[in-house]
Image (tube, helix red, strand yellow):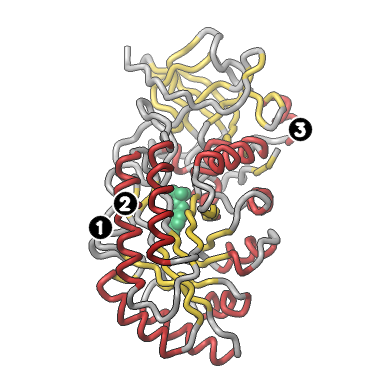
């Protein structure tokens, strides 16, 4: 027999009569209400709970921003707007979603390399803070600001001289397309000062999907130290310091939930020290997946069940075209199974070793590789957990031309 992958306690939802309940509705009933599969469902209450718990854990003095690329569904962003202090966007499209959500422009920041002139113009006109990724971007922002008669608000995104260790995705240290190399920042600050744009502070984001408190603490400490050093050359007092985030969630067998208590204690200490160095500055953390990933499920339906040379295949109407990350093709080096369950046979029912695949003509279209699931037959629903972030919008929907999944916030 092949190994039985054991996942960390990942189910964030109630299980009633062995059926998963999302948004207060048993999953098969929810599917009937939606009227089609596949779909993504995001649990409003689970998002609220996550933010509340995080606020209780983190020190009071820290603001919480949501990086909407994790899940830009307008209903989700609208809900989070009522819970967090600001939004971070990375494109004109995300900027529109953020502004439409009702979040004040003054609490929205825009990071991302390669901002085009239309994006810079839109952000400057709206009063959104640009997290500058290069000196060229600063020059274009200055010119656009003059042309449209609005003073750009800018923060400098720094590519630090350290990296976030054990990060799922490293976004700093060494040569990177993100941010301005720390050693080049003083010159950029001088230019900001002489150009008269509105300087707001620094954005130092060093990585993503980290489950190790020690690494997060090390990166936080280095981030604050770097900010103090760079602030010496700042043209004005810092209004804000965005220290990034990088809090991960457990996806794969053996991964444990991130314990934030030590991270939070350290942050408390850093905040005190920060007041001494930088005075009354707003310190913010920006999180994407940590706020939404565990609140979402992807649900597809078994269309065919077949046995091939001793292995059982559940062929579903969902797959990598809807959920690239769960297929293992979005940032994974060695493919591992996302947590998957049969919707109405979560824990108790007779179990079966199966492969869950999609309808695409490629062996990459795999949602579960030899997993033991509650027995499922044609017409039953298969659920991929941990799917509230980097799911719907991070997948190639057009590939093979199957219908798009729906998204609901319940
Ligand atoms: C992607 C990204 C985030 C969000 O990362 P998560 O792992 O989803 O928390 C935050 N900030 C920036 C600048 C990003 O590029």
- Horizontal and vertical percent position of residue 224: 35, 59
- Horizontal and vertical percent position of residue 80: 63, 50
Q: Is residue 112 above or below residue 347?
A: below
Q: Nearer the viewer, residue 347 or 58?
A: 58
- Residue drawn 36% across and 32% down? 336
Tag of residue 33 = 3
Tag of residue 219 = 2
Crowd class of label 1 (few under 14; some 14 to 19; many from 20; radius 10 Å): some
User: In the structure shown, which secondary structural element does the residue marked by tag 3 occupy?
Assistant: helix
Q: Which quadrant, please, contains the C terminus? A: top right
Q: Name which of mark 2 and mark 3 comes first in the sequence.
A: 3
Q: Name which of mark 3 and mark 1 comes first in the sequence.
A: 3
Q: Quadrant of residue 48?
A: top right
- Horizontal and vertical percent position of residue 349: 55, 9
User: In the structure shown, which secondary structural element does the residue marked by tag 2 occupy?
Assistant: helix
Per the image, the residue denoted by label 1 is: 162
Q: Is residue 308 above or below residue 144?
A: above
Q: Nearer the viewer, residue 154 or 114?
A: 154
């Amino acid at each position: 027999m092949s190994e039985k992958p054991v996942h960390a306690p990942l189910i964030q939802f109630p299980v009633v009569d062995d059926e998963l309940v999302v948004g207060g509705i048993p999953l098969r009933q929810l599917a009937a209400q939606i009227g089609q599969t596949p779909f993504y469902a995001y649990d409003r209450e689970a998002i609220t709970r996550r933010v509340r718990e995080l606020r209780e854990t983190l020190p009071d003095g820290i603001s919480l921003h949501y990086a909407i690329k994790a899940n830009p569904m307008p209903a989700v962003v609208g809900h989070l707007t009522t819970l967090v202090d600001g939004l971070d966007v990375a494109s004109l499209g995300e900027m529109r979603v953020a502004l439409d959500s009702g979040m004040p422009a003054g609490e929205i920041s825009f990071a991302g390399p390669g901002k085009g002139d239309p994006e810079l113009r839109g952000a400057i006109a709206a009063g959104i803070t640009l997290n500058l990724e290069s000196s060229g971007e600063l020059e274009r922002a200055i010119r656009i600001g003059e042309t449209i008669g609005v003073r750009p608000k800018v923060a400098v995104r720094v590519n630090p001289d350290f990296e976030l260790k054990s990060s799922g995705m490293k976004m700093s240290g060494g040569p990177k397309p993100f941010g301005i190399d720390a050693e080049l920042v003083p010159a950029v600050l001088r230019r900001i000062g002489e150009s008269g744009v509105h300087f707001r502070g620094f954005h130092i984001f060093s990585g993503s999907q980290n489950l190790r408190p020690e690494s997060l603490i090390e990166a936080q400490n280095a981030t604050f130290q770097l900010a103090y050093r760079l602030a010496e050359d700042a043209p004005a007092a810092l209004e804000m310091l965005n220290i990034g985030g990088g809090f991960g969630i457990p996806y794969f067998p053996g991964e444990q939930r991130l314990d934030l208590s030590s991270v939070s204690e350290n942050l408390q200490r850093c905040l005190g020290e920060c007041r001494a160095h930088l005075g009354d500055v707003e310190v913010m953390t920006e999180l994407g997946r940590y706020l939404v990933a565990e609140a979402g499920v992807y649900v597809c339906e078994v269309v065919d069940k077949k046995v091939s040379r001793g292995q059982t295949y559940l062929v579903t109407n969902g797959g990598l075209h809807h959920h690239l990350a769960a297929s293992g093709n979005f940032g994974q080096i060695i493919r591992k199974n996302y947590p998957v369950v049969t919707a109405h046979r979560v824990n108790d029912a007779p179990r079966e070793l199966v492969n869950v695949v999609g309808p695409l003509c490629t062996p990459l279209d795999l949602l579960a590789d030899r997993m033991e699931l509650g027995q499922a037959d044609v017409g039953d629903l298969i659920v991929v957990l941990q799917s509230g972030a980097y799911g719907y919008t991070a997948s190639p929907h057009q590939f093979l031309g199957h219908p798009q999944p729906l998204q609901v916030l319940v």
